[in-house]
Image (cartoon, grey):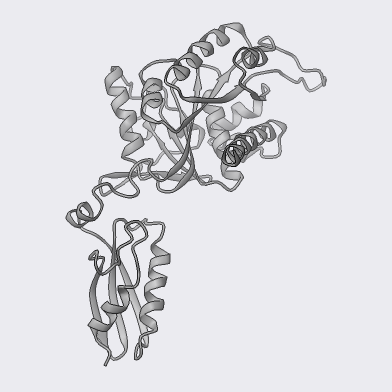
Amino acid sequence: MLNTDKVRDALRSIPEPELGKNLVELGMIKDIRVDSGKVTLTLALTTLRCPRKKEMVGQIKKVVGEIPGVITVDVQVAELSDEERKRLFPKHPLVGIEKVGQILAVASGKGGVGKTTVAVNIALALAGEGKKVGLLDADVYGPSIPLMLGLSQKPNIENGMLIPVEKFGLKIISFGMLMKEGQAVVWRGPLVARAIKQLLGEVMWGELDYLVVDLPPGTGDPSITIAQSLPKVQVLMVTTPQEAALVDVRRSVELFVKFKREIIGFIENMSYFLANDSSEPIAIFGQGGGDTLSRETGLPLLGAIPIDLEISRAGDSGEPLLVSSAASSAAQIFRDVARKILKRADDKKIC
């Protein structure tokens, strides 16, 4: 005869993906009811945004549906209480960066070199290659990613965790989303470092192939925090051709080398300008800076981005270049850089 015990016994065959123990043993199956062949029950998850929710509900319906006498199976989904969640997961399985495959920090020695533009478009280019990508605006002093992506909403909070805002296929969090418009940040170094650690650890990033982090310029506390806290971080350095930029980039390179963090290469931004009536590139800010750094360090120059009015317009409009002008030559350069980053990662796996 069909009863709740038979349903419960059948469900013991379904393991929880993170813990390996079965759903019944973990207390994640609740309120089983059987009425004339109709089975209803509740699956309690750590979060309603659990990426395996659909898969687990499907497993439950399949297993229970195979019990003789079962006609229909109705699975309701709820959240575990705080006490239950802490008991099962002393560290929430989706907290922070635990499920992030690779962190790519975009850094520069000085401001004004287009670092944020590079971070946004590289993130979009990686997403365009089929990767799950997050974008963290860690520039506490000048968070401009909300403007570049046309974001005005605040992130939601669930179980004490920030939920990234999603747009253009990216999961996005920025200090700019957490402050009042026009608010000036006057935090000292230790507070900045603590805030960055919170954004890395208290945002529900979930499963990502890449988390692209837009760092503040220079070698201050934010960069040091990233370098010290994240052993799997890779650094992409942004420069412009002139010598003044190269001096500062060299200092940043020394910082990350000091902490034994991997620098994957350079991007030279504002590299040249193409006038409408000429096919000859005009080196407004000088030339050869990226090549010079590459020779000095042995690190590759991954790409040279031209001065393009469309890049500036796109950033101000809330639709970055890879969205507003995806077919442009500058957008193709960003895609080429992203593919080089992915190829490098694949080559390391083979080795």
Q: Please report the residue visible at 61 percent of the width from the left and 45 percent of the height from the top.
A: 129
Q: Is residue 180 visible?
A: no
Percent coordinates x, y for residue 262 in the rendering: 50, 26
Q: Please report the residue visible at 30 percent of the width from the left and 82 percent of the height from the top.
A: 39
Q: Is residue 8 left or right of residue 97?
A: left
Percent coordinates x, y for residue 112 in the rendering: 53, 16
Q: Quadrant of the N terminus?
A: bottom left
Q: Is residue 148 left or right of residue 288?
A: left
Question: Closer to the camera, 346 or 181?
Answer: 346
Q: Is residue 333 left or right of residue 315?
A: right
Which residue appears farthest toward the front when viewing the image?
351
Percent coordinates x, y for residue 284 in the rendering: 69, 11
Q: Looking at the picture, does residue 186 appear above or below residue 314?
A: above
The quadrant in which residue 68 appears is: bottom left
Percent coordinates x, y for residue 61 in the rendering: 39, 76
Q: Looking at the picture, does residue 169 appear above or below residue 279?
A: below
Q: Looking at the picture, does residue 69 appear above or below residue 253?
A: below
Q: Is residue 318 visible?
A: yes
Q: Quadrant of the C terminus?
A: top right
Q: Is residue 271 left or right of residue 88?
A: right
Q: Please report the residue visible at 31 percent of the width from the left and 86 percent of the height from the top.
A: 38
